[in-house]
Amino acid sequence: MDIAQAASKNIAFTIAAAQSTSVPLDVVANVQNHLRFVEAAAQLGVQWLVFPELSLTGYELAAMPDLVLHPEHALLAPLREAAQRTGMAITLGAPVDSGSALPFIGAITLRPDGQHYVYAKHHLHGSETRFATAGSAPVGLQEWGGQQIASAICADTNHPGHAAQAAAAGARVYAAGILNSANGYAAEAPLWAGYAREHAMTVVIANHGGPSGGYVSAGRSGIWGTDGALLVEAADTGDCLVVARTT
């Protein structure tokens, strides 16, 4: 695993993007890989770690109903224990129950205080509308270390109104797990920088480290400071822990 890190006075606490590579449909294997990232992040004092969209299953839309997870799921026990042991909040990508036949594309945050949280992707994209239910809440906000952190998932970040609503709700960090190709990344990275600058939010983007669900990821997970400047990013694809530390 590569590590990219930087320090900035514009970061309220130490936060990281886990650019992980998912094994398709294998939650057990992906949990083990997630644990590798958690242990590496703990050694660097990370307080909040964000994984890519559907990181625990891969971007396998048609299979999501058979892979639904929730914060107390038995398969996630090692990660819950790791969150408590390290004092780190960990945001995972997974299908979650929507109460209907089509699940949500979710971001599950396992918190060391035991108050876990689920955000459901609000803006679905392309074929996702055939396989998933859109989340009704446009803003998923949590408090951590005196800061408000808003979750986002991939296509959410294409909509300036999503980041604006998060900022209006008090978010100082906008943290997204994504799956983005090279073309998509080139088009959307200026948006992420703009959100950071316009709303004085730290923006965290965790992209997949390798192909998933038929998409070739661009990698290049990154963190933008509150002035819109890119603080740190993964150089390319592959497993990489991207860390922005407080000074």
Image (cartoon, helix red, strand yellow):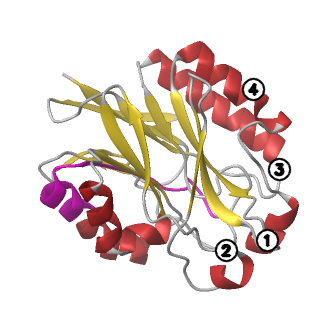
Which mark sits nearer the N-terminus, 1 or 2?
Answer: 1
Q: Residues within 10 Å of mark 3 (few under 14, many from 20)?
A: few
Residue designated by label 1: 100
Query: Which kind of residue does numbered mark 1 sit on?
Result: Ser
Which mark sits nearer the N-terminus, 3 or 4?
Answer: 3
Q: CA distance from mark 3 to mark 1?
A: 23 Å
As helix, strand or loop, the secondary structure at mark 4 comes to helix
On whether residue 28 falls in the magenta region, the answer is: no
On whether residue 197 falls in the magenta region, the answer is: yes
Which mark sits nearer the N-terminus, 1 or 4?
Answer: 4
Residue designated by label 4: 78
Q: CA distance from mark 3 to mark 4?
A: 15 Å
Q: Residues within 10 Å of mark 4 (few under 14, many from 20)?
A: few
Q: Mark 2 and mark 3 in contact (Cβ < 8 Å)? A: no
Give the magenta range: 192-211
Query: Which kind of residue does numbered mark 4 sit on?
Result: Pro
| Of labels 3 and 2, the one closer to you | 2
The foreground one among 156 and 242 is 156
Q: Is residue 130 above or below residue 109?
A: below
Image coordinates for residue 87, horizontal then vertical, percent: 52, 18
